[in-house]
Structures are given as structure tokens and as C-alpha cells.
Amino acid sequence: MRLSKYHRLWIYAVGGTLVASGTGWLIAHYLLIEPGPFAEAQHPSEPWWLRLHGAAMMVFLVVLGTILPGHVRQAWSLRKINAASVKRNVTTGILMLSLVTGLGVTGYALYYCGSEELPLPQYLPLGDGTRRNARLLPAPQKSRSEAEHH
């Protein structure tokens, strides 16, 4: 059972936008830090990357909502068939939905529970930990003033 050409196009376009905007924010946040008169300042593009990422996530949720009632429900009803391809596809689907759920929960937690006083991304498995484990960017270094206080 395949998704329609338009569903696949929307998934790839929105998924690509999510990856690009998330990567853009990581680069702006960790590599394009601008020195300010009193402390390091955020790069001017950082909030725009987050806005694009949030908008793309809303579109992704709509696309996911169009897939759940047909594609996912039909695939779930086929899971009792003993064919290896059906079991593999159902397993992959469960893993994908679990990943999307995890990303949604961590994104929600970062948006509503994160703050400068509580650097929440380092405690979330899909936040800062993913970036460090993937070795995409080096871990941020503590400033001298932070190191002296600890």
C-alpha cells in the first residue's frame, strides 16, 4: 500500500523544511554567535529559523492527520497477515510514529518548559543530546564566568 504521489511530495517537502530550518537554527545558535558589548548576542536569523520550524511543524501535523485515518489504519488492520513485508512495514510505521511522537513531545517541552535558567535541551534525548551524539556540531563550551561559578 503506497501513499499517493501528492502525499509523498508533501511529506518530503515538509520534512525537508523541518530538517533545513532545524539545521539553520543550530548553525545560527551555536556557530554564528555575535560578540556584544556585555555578552554574546544571538544571531539575528535565529528567531526566523524557529518561526519557520514552527510553521513547518504545523503543516507536518496536518499532513500526518491526512495519513492517519486511511494509510495507517489500513496498514494496522493488515498486521495479522503473516507476510514478512507486511510485518516489516508495520514495524517501520510504528517506529516512525514513535519518532514523530517523541519529537513532538520534546518540541513541546522545549517551547513551553525551556528557559535560560533551565537549559532543558541537554536533558531531553531528542534535543541537545541528539546533536551531540550525532557529532554534527561540537558541544557548547561554558564561558569563563560560568566555569568560575561552578
Image: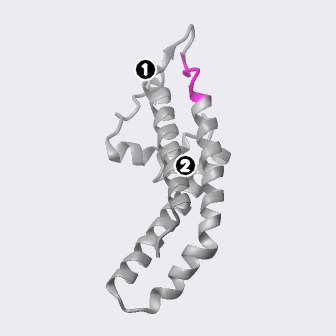
Residue 108 visible to an observer of this rendering: no
Amino acid type of the residue tagged 1 in the rendering: Arg
Q: Quadrant of residue 141?
A: top left
Q: What distance separates the C-alpha of mark 1 from that of mark 2?
A: 40 Å
**Horizontal arrangement in the rendering, residue 119 relative to residue 137 (left or right):** right
The residue labelled by disc 1 is 144
At 58% from the left and 79% from the top, the residue drawn is 73
* Residue 44 magenta: yes
Q: Pick the quarter of the image with the C terminus.
A: top left
Q: Residue at horizontal 51%, vertical 33%?
A: 25
Does residue 48 appear anywhere in the picture? yes
Element class at badge 2: helix
Q: Are marks 1 and 2 in contact (CB under 8 Å)?
A: no
Dividing the picture into quarters, in which one does residue 138 lie?
Answer: top left
Query: Which range is magenta?
Result: 40-47
Lateral position of residue 137 relative to residue 69, left or right? left
Residue with the mark numbered 2: 14
Image location (x, y in percent) of residue 43: 54, 21
Q: Tell me where residue 120 appears, x and y as whole percent.
A: 55, 44
Identified at 55% across, 60% down, the residue is 7
Verify whether residue 19 appears in magenta: no
The location of residue 111, given as percent across then percent down, is: 64, 45
